[in-house]
Image: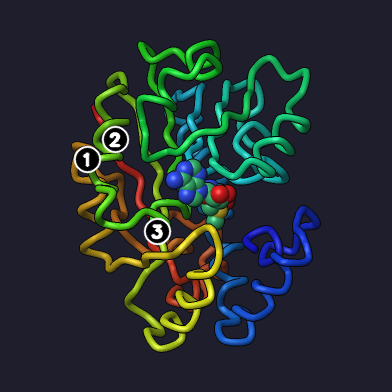
Amino acid sequence: MYDYYLGGSHNFAVDRQRAAEVLVVLPQARVFARQNRAFLRRAVRYFVAQGIQQFLDLGAGLPTVGAAHEVAVECRVVYVDDEPTAVAHGQLLLAGNPLAACVQADITRPDEVLDHPDTQRILDFDQPLGVLLCAVLHFVPDERGPAGVVRAYREALAPGSMLALSHATATDYPDLLAEVVDTYRVTQNQAYPRTRAEVTGLVASFEQLVWPGVVYTPEWRPEHVADIGDPTESLAYAVVATCP
Ligand SMILES: C[S@@+](CC[C@H](N)C(=O)[O-])C[C@H]1O[C@@H](n2cnc3c(N)ncnc32)[C@H](O)[C@@H]1O
């Protein structure tokens, strides 16, 4: 569905049908996907500018156009997703690339992700790492402890590592969002949008927030002011946090 919002071609009829239903109710879903992806690209570039040369992309989806290994060429990247088709597709795309791998795992089980042979082969946990948690934690309910999941990854990181997180917001367009949450209920990914305060709480285990803190995705260090538009239409917050 996300790929369809992005205008991609890696989607199936059932995805297109459900995504089209969402777009009727909430046309901003396209803005959400594009602005989220643009935030991810800016965050990866920012990490590289800070000297980070390896990435763990949690809930990566398909590593297609604009994925971390394309933005940060020559960096090492492990993509993680629990959706078998996305992972199989990703493994094909990355075949023969010694610097990147696509791992099938549930990100709410950090030990399985961190101990996976491909993670261990590609990433060096003694060096700073960029962790991406973009548009995925809103699929993790409070009962599964999303802040504890973030903390578990934080504890595995060397000083100088960074986290980029984006997350659907519950604050704007509440009636429309309620309908969309209903649509997602019948998919494999039930959605749990959260408030700005709740999103801030998710990254509490990281010591510092990079300026400008928790903002709408297009407001996080935009390349051009004109790219921001109506920030509420992005339907998502973004934050970058560090562990010095
Ligand atoms: C909206 S896509 C985001 C893709 C990418 N991170 C981005 O921001 O462009 C969310 C992805 O998270 C994956 N996902 C959801 N829950 C997950 C979990 N518990 N473990 C691993 N992947 C998960 C879905 O399969 C989907 O590919």
Q: Quadrant of the N terminus?
A: bottom right
Q: Quadrant of the C terminus?
A: top left
CA–CA distance between discs 1 and 2? 5 Å
- Residue 43 horizontal/vertical position (percent): 48, 43
Q: Position of residue 157 (x, y in %)?
A: 31, 23
Indicate yes or no: mark 3 CB to ligand 1 under 8 Å.
Answer: no
The answer to which quarter of the image holds residue 242 is top left
Relative height, residue 151 to residue 17 (above, below): above
Residue 143's image quarter? Answer: bottom left
Count all numbered tags in the image, as a single digit.
Answer: 3
Give the camera-side residue of 110 and 241. 110
Q: Is residue 89 left or right of residue 114?
A: right
Task: Tell me what residue is drawn at x 50 percent, y 23 percent.
Answer: 54
Q: Sequence order check: which comes first, mark 2 or mark 3?
A: 3
User: Do tag 1 and tag 2 residues touch (Cβ < 8 Å)?
Assistant: yes
Q: Which residue is mark 2?
A: 242
Query: How many angstroms separate mark 2 from mark 3 (CA)?
Result: 21 Å
Residue topped by disc 1: 208
Given this view, does label 3 or label 1 mark the residue nearer the observer? Answer: 3
Q: Which residue is mark 3?
A: 138
- Decide which of 43, 149 is in the foreground and name it: 149
Residue at 50% in and 34% down: 105
